[in-house]
Image (spheres, rainbow, N blue to C red):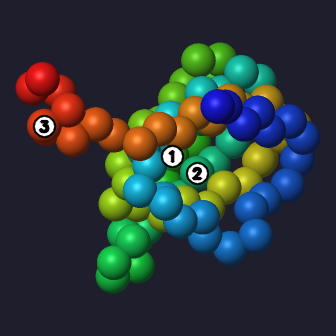
Amino acid sequence: MGSPFRGRGSAWGWAHSSGKRAISILLHGRFVISFRDTHDHESAGEVCLSELGDYVLWSEALEHHWHSVDESLVLTVRWVPRTTSETSA
């Protein structure tokens, strides 16, 4: 399931991956997502989504934090990745 965000604001703290991969797609506005490693909490960079259709895809090894620069509409979809044994069947 997706979780749309619309408005201005920021996340409270860092969101854990919970073993899921994710993609966020910008539909309107400007939106910044920062990443850090789940294990050592080292910064893994920051992405600014600023044009319609900009997206960022991240793995379950990253935590994220976000803030909207302008009023924004972002669609985020999360999923549990398949294991190698599931894809070879």
**Residue at the spot x=66%, y=55% of the render?**
66
Name which of mark 3 and mark 1 comes first in the sequence.
Answer: 1
* Residue with the most extreme left position: 88
Numbered tag placed on residue 33 in the rendering:
2
Q: Is residue 45 visible?
A: no
Name which of mark 1 and mark 2 comes first in the sequence.
Answer: 2
Residue density around tag 2, few if under 14, some if 14–19, many if 20 or more, within 10 Å = some
Left or right: residue 56 compared with residue 59: right
The residue pinned by badge 1 equals 47
- What amino acid type should be assigned to the residue bearing mark 1? Val
Numbered tag placed on residue 85 in the rendering:
3
Name which of mark 3 and mark 2 comes first in the sequence.
Answer: 2
* Residue with the most extreme bottom position: 40
Q: Kindly check if marks 1 and 2 are in contact, taking CB atoms under 8 A apart as contact.
A: yes
Q: How many marks?
A: 3
Residue density around tag 1, few if under 14, some if 14–19, many if 20 or more, within 10 Å = some
Identify which residue, 73 or 23, lies in the foreground: 23
Q: Kindly check if marks 3 and 2 are in contact, taking CB atoms under 8 A apart as contact.
A: no
Where's residue 20, x and y in %? 44, 49
Q: Quadrant of the C terminus?
A: top left
Q: Secondary structure at mark 2?
A: strand
Q: Secondary structure at mark 3?
A: helix
Identify which residue, 68 or 89, lies in the foreground: 89
Q: Quadrant of the N terminus?
A: top right
- Report, in whole angstroms, how far the alpha carbon at label 1 lies from the one at label 2: 5 Å
**Up/down of 80 relative to 12, above or below:** above
Where's residue 8, x and y in %? 88, 47
